[in-house]
Amino acid sequence: MQTMRSRQPNCLASRLVVIGTILFCLMTAPVKVWAATVELPLFLSTDLLQRALTKHLFPQPNQAITLFQEGRYRYLHAEQPRFYIRNGQPHFACHAAASMGFEFLGFWPMGVAWSGSIDLTLQPFVDAQWQLRYRVVDSTIHDDKGEKPGVTGYIWDLSKRFLHPRLETFTFDLAMPQKEIIGLLRTCAQPSDTAQLEVALRTMTAGVLVAGDAGITVPLALTVAESRLQPPPPLPQAVLTPEEVASFQQALEPWDAFLVFVIKSAGAEFVDQRMREQLFELLLTSRYDLLPILDGEAPVNAHDPLRTLFATAWQQLRTIIEEGGKRGLMQDNMLRYMTFINAGDALLALDKAAPGLGMQLSTDGMRQLARTLQPGVAGDPLSFSWEVDPALRELFQFAPEPAPGIETITFRQRLLEFLIAPAWAAESEAMSVVDLNKRLERWVPTSQELDEYQPVVAQLIKAIADEELKQSGLTPVYAALYQHLMPTTALIESCWHQYVRKGDKVSFLYSQAGSVGIMQINQNVWRGFYNVERLRWDVAYNTQAGAQILMRYLKQYAIAVGEKSGEPNNAARSAYSIYNAGPRAARRFMNPKSSVREKRVDERLWAIYQGVAASGGVDLTTCRAASPGTPEPGASLP
C-alpha cells in the first residue's frame, strides 16, 4: 500500500507534464485555415481542337500525308482527318490507304492493298508545361464497307508505329490563355484583396478534364480560403437621384465603349448577316437595360454597377461567338476569340464561387480584355465619343446619314417648289422637309398657336414616313400600319414637340434617361448611330431617326410577331414595345405578367394607335387621337 501511495505523486506529475505539453502545442501551433477548391473553366471547342490537330498532322490543307513508304508497294497514307467527341471520349479518325505488297522478280507487284478508316480513342491530359496532349488508348479499323479487314494486324501495326506517335506529339498551348486569365483576374482584384488572390493563383493546377460534344473543358483549380467563399454583406440597392445620374453615366462609359469595340471587332471579321443581327440586338439590349436605372425606375448597386450588366451581356456575347464558330466563321481567329471568352468566363466564375475575393470589372480589366481580343490594336480600345461612328452605321447597314442642308424630298415636291413659291401657310402642299424644318425651328407653340403648329408637324411626319416607306418593300398592309405608327409614336413620346421653354429660353425636350426631341431618341441607346446635336435641335433629323428606328424594328422583329399571331396590328404594338424597351420587349404586350407600368404604356399605345388609324388625326391639346366624328381643326394628317 505504501508503495502504491508513493507512486501517485509521480503519476500526477507525469499527467500534468503531458497536459501542459498538449496545451503548449495547441497555443503555439499555427491556426488552421480551412480552404476549398474553386474551378475556373477553360473551354476548348471541338472546332478549335479539330483545326489545331489537323494543322499538326496535315501541314498541307486538303492533302493526304505519307505516314510510311517503303518502295512502291509498302505504304500507309492518311487523309480526311476528323476530331470528334462521343460519349465523353475524344476520338481522332481518318481515311487511310495501305499496302503490304512487294515486287516479284523485280517487276511484278505482289501483295494486298487496303483502304478504309482508322479511329483512335484518345485520353486528353495537361502536362507540367500547360500543354494539352493526348494518349491513344484504343483503336478500331474498318474497310470502306465498314467491315473489319483481314489484314487488321498489319494495318494496326503500321498505325501504331507511324500514326500513334505523331498524334501523341501533338500539343495545344494552354499557357497563353492561362496567362491572359491570370492577368485579367489580377487587374480586376480590389487592392485589399490582391494578396489573397495571389495566394490562390499560386495554387493553380489543371483539374480533371471533362469532354462533351461541344469540346473539352480544362478546369483551372484554385485553392481559396473558405472565408473568401462567402459573399460580403449586401450593399443597399438604391434608385438614383437626378444628381447621381451624370456620375453613373460616366462610370458606364468605359463599359459601353468596351462593348462597341468588341462588337465592331467581331462584325468586321465575320461577314455573316445572322451574326450582325445578333450583335446589333446585343448592343441595343445592353443599352436599353440602362434606361430604367437612369430614369429612376430600377435600383442599382452603386458600389459595382457593372456586375449585373456585364454578366447579362457576356452570356449573350459568348453564345453569339460560339454559334459563329459552329458556322465556320472564325477560321484562323478562333484561338483569339476562345482566349477572350475564357478570360471573361473565368472572371465571372471566380466572382460567383469566391465573392469574398472582391473581383470587380474595372476599366483596366475591360481594357486588358479588349486587347486580348485584338492584341495589336492601336490607341485606347475604351475610347468614348458621342460622335457619329461611320463604321458602326456601316456594320449594321444604316442608310447614309443626311448631311446638314440636304433636302430629302420627292421629285413631285421639287417640281411644285419650282412652280409655286414656298409659303409658310399650313395649306401649302409644296413645303419641302427643309422648309418645314425651318418653320418649326425652336418653335414652342402656345395653346393659341396649336392650330397653326399642328398641320406643319403633321406634314413633316408624313413626308418623312413616306420617304422611309419608298425603300422599305413593305406590303400594303404593313405600309399602312407604319403610316399610322409614326404619328402615334411621336404623339406618345412628345405630343409632337421638339422643344420646351425654360424661363425665357428655348431648349430641346429631354428626359432623365437621355431621350431627346419629338421622337424621344435616346442618346445612350443610339450613341454612334446619330448626331447628338442634330437630334436635339433639328426636328426633321430627329423625326427621320425615329422613322428609321421604327422601320428597322418593324421589319426585323415586329412583322414576325404579327404574322405568327395572325393579327397584323400586333406588329404595330410589338414595334412600339421595342421602341420603348428594346428587342426583348417584342412580345411584352402579350405577357400577362408585365408590370403595371408596362401594361399602362402598351395600352396607351394601342388606344392612340386605333384612334389615329380611325380618324387620321390627333389632338395636341390632350395629346390623344382626335375623335373620328369631330376631328380638331387642322388635326388630320395630309
Image (tube, rainbow, N blue to C red):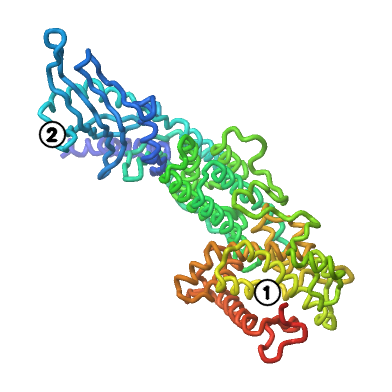
Q: Nearer the viewer, residue 576 or 223?
A: 576
- Identity of the amino acid at label 1? Pro
Say whether residue 630 is left or right of residue 55: right
The residue that appears at 67% across and 91% down in the rendered structure is 629
Which residue matches tag 1? Answer: 487
**Residue at the disc numbered 2:** 148
- Give the percent coordinates (x, y) of residue 53: 36, 31
Decide: is 595 above or below 326: below
Q: Under tag 2, what secondary structure?
A: loop
- Can you name the residue that lies furthest to the left here? 150
Residue 431 on image: x %, y %: 80, 70
Image quarter where the N terminus lies is top left
State which tag comes first along the sequence, 2 or 1. 2
Q: Is residue 35 visible?
A: no
Give the class, few, some or many, for how many residues have Cα within 10 Å of label 1's Cα (few <14, many ≥20): many
**Outermost right residue:** 504
Instruction: Check contact, mark 2 vs mark 1: CB within 8 A.
Output: no
Left or right? Give the position of 321 relative to 360: left
> Residue at coordinates 19% horizontally, 35% vertically from top-left?
144
For residue 26, what is the image quadrant?
top left
**Quarter of the image where one finds residue 246:** bottom right
Residue 461 sits in which quadrant? Answer: bottom right
Q: What numbered label is drawn on residue 509?
A: none
Q: Secondary structure at mark 1?
A: helix
List x then y, in percent, for residue 262: 57, 45
Q: Which quadrant, please, contains the C terminus?
A: bottom right
Q: How many marks?
A: 2
Q: CA distance from mark 2 to mark 1?
A: 74 Å
Task: Farthest residue to the top: give it.
Answer: 106
Q: Amino acid at mark 2?
A: Lys
